[in-house]
Structure formats: C-alpha cells, structure tokens
Image: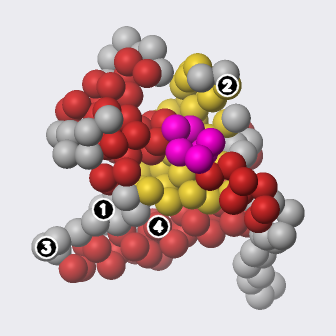
Amino acid sequence: MRIMGVDPGYATVGFGIVEYANGKFAAAGYGAVTTKADAAFETRLAEIYADLFGIIDKYRPEFMAVERLFFTTNRKTAIDVAQARGIILLAAANKGVEIAEYTPLQVKQAVTGYGKAVKKQVQEMTARILSLSEIPKPDDVADALAVAVCHAHSYNSRISDFKKRRGTRRPFRFETEK
C-alpha cells in the first residue's frame, strides 16, 4: 500500500510517501512544499494545491493521511492553517485519493507506542521504522512521514470500514469559469 502523509501548513507543507507491505516500511519519497511569506495568501493556497496535485500525480498514493489541527494559542494561525488544510484535502479528493485524519496523539501512539512522546522521539522512531540514515528536515517532513506510518499501523483495524466506503465516494471536481 502506498500512503502519502501530510503535515499541513501554509508556509511549509511536509509530505512523505511511504510504501507498506507485509509489515515492512519503505520511504518512497518525501519533501516540503513551501510558499513565500510575502506572497498573497490566496496565491500561497493556489501554489500548495498545484504542487500537491503534481505530487499526487507523481507518486499515485492509495491513501492520504493528514494530521488534524491542534492549536491552543494563535487563532489567526489556526484559521490560516485550516484553510491550507482544506486545500490539501481538496487536492486529494479531486484525485480520488482516500483520506484519513489523525490527531497528534494518535500519531505519537502509533509510531512510538506512547501518546505523550516528544517530537524528537517520534522523529527518531519514524527514521528507524523507515530505515533512514537521518531524520528528514524540515520537521514538517518528518512529521508527514510519521502520519503515513500511523496510517499504515491503523489501516488494518479500519480495513473493513474502508472496504465498505470504497466505490461509494466520488471525487469532487472544482470547476472554474473560463
């Protein structure tokens, strides 16, 4: 199974493509989509959409696992990241990629076995699971790979649910005026 993990943002969107078969993991690719801070926000969103659309075309994942947002302080940042997250989900939906969402607690639990693990522990364990010589940078990339690993671990417990839904969902097509 090929999973695209995504750590949402609007300045940096981390992505990681993970292959999972017979209990074994391999990183098929990873990186970050970045936008310029001085660009108009709608331009940044358009860039994220276009870049992710291309990444989905290149790697053809079966699933996209996205981290759910968790903010406690800055509401403006939370709203902007939520908008970017919507664009990320739209790109997956338009490509017909099945979407799964996980909280930071679920990702930590799936990767380290401990829901209160610190970021560094999650990143180190993700690198070990994927047999990477070092933790990918920036942190958003390592986080995206961790979300993909989380989905692989969680998939078997949700397989019947996915099988029931598969074939009943149609991709949403966003049409623009010409």
Distance Cα–Cα, label 4 vs label 3? 18 Å
Residue 110: x %, y % from top left = 40, 40
Residue 6: x %, y % from top left = 48, 50
Distance Cα–Cα, label 2 vs label 4? 28 Å
Q: Nearer the viewer, residue 47 or 108?
A: 108
Residue underneath mark 1: 37
Q: Residue at x 72, y 54 (%)?
A: 160
Residue 175 found in image quarter: bottom right
- Crowd class of label 4 (few under 14; some 14 to 19; many from 20; radius 10 Å): many
Distance Cα–Cα, label 1 vs label 3? 21 Å
Residue underneath mark 4: 85
For the residues labelled 4 and 3, say whether their Cβ atoms are less than 8 Å apart.
no
Q: Nearer the viewer, residue 156 or 140?
A: 156
Residue underneath mark 3: 73
Disc on the earlier residue, 4 or 3: 3
Which of labels 2 and 4 is toward the front?
2
Residue 163 appears anywhere in the view = yes
- Crowd class of label 3 (few under 14; some 14 to 19; many from 20; radius 10 Å): few
Magenta residues (range): 152-157
